[in-house]
Amino acid sequence: DAEITQSPRHKITETGRQVTLACHQTWNHNNMFWYRQDLGHGLRLIHYSYGVQDTNKGEVSDGYSVSRSNTEDLPLTLESAASSQTSVYFCASSESLGRNEQFFGPGTRLTVL
Amino acid sequence: DAKTTQPPSMDCAEGRAANLPCNHSTISGNEYVYWYRQIHSQGPQYIIHGLKNNETNEMASLIITEDRKSSTLILPHATLRDTAVYYCIVTLYNFNKFYFGSGTKLNVKP
């Protein structure tokens, strides 16, 4: 069955380290998204991509970057991790051409010490 | 994108209908209403969406008022497994960006 996976599921890192969170989907969806969710809050959009080589900033993009070299993957990189980036990160994907149902991954819990 | 307002929490008895309201008074004519839910710490799950007509699927019904300024998600027979945070989102159909608010925590009680 097609799916969307994230790895690692849990990560502990230190301030200043570079961290990359992986997101892989097998639906061949053009659109992919990264969100963060802080305790007791809704999801906030970090970056999104409408296709290969396309990336766009969301509402909380500072300190994060993404690259889209193929359809299946959208890795999220924290260039220099900060304690404020401790959060749960969700990746999602959706078809293009107007079908906006987003399918979410299981999430990655990141702790920055 | 239009903003949405939802009550922070609601209770519902198991087996009863759960009616979750959402206000979106600034919605524009080409914006859709989407509902997602998040069970515990899992990724959000799509429930239903609509433009101006009422919609129904195997999970829920969506009732949108004639002026489109508010909507109600109806879970016809709530179960304990429906306990979750429910998010109402308004977005352009082709815009592909969702802005999640704080949602409504639905507590289904036996």
Image (cartoon, grey):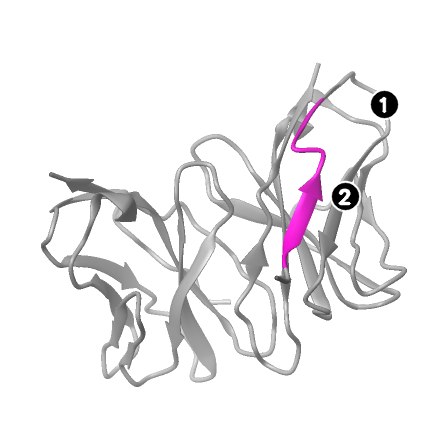
Q: Residues within 10 Å of mark 2 (few under 14, many from 20)?
A: some
Answer above or below: position of A44 versus A32.
Answer: above
B101 or B49, which is in the foreground?
Answer: B49
Q: Does the magenta stretch mainly form a helix, a strand or a loop?
A: strand
Q: Residue at x 44, y 76 (%)?
A: B32
x then y, percent, for residue B41? 46, 36
* Chain under callout 2: A
Residue type, label 1? Arg
Q: Residue at x 52, y 68 (%)?
A: A101
Query: Could you say whether the residue bearing mark 2 is in a helix, strand or loop?
Result: strand
A97 or B80, which is in the foreground?
Answer: B80
Q: Residue at x 23, y 60 (%)?
A: B21
x then y, percent, for residue A33? 67, 56
Count every numbered label the image shows and give the total. Answer: 2
Q: Are marks 2 and 1 on the same chain?
A: yes
> Which label number is shown at residue A22?
2
> Which label number is shown at residue B23?
none
x then y, percent, for residue B58? 30, 70
**Quadrant housing the N terminus of chain A:** bottom right
B103 or B79, which is in the foreground?
Answer: B79
- Left or right: residue B29 compared with residue B7: right
Q: Which residues are magenta?
A: A3-11
Q: Residue at x 59, y 81 (%)?
A: A98
Location of mark 1 (residue): A17
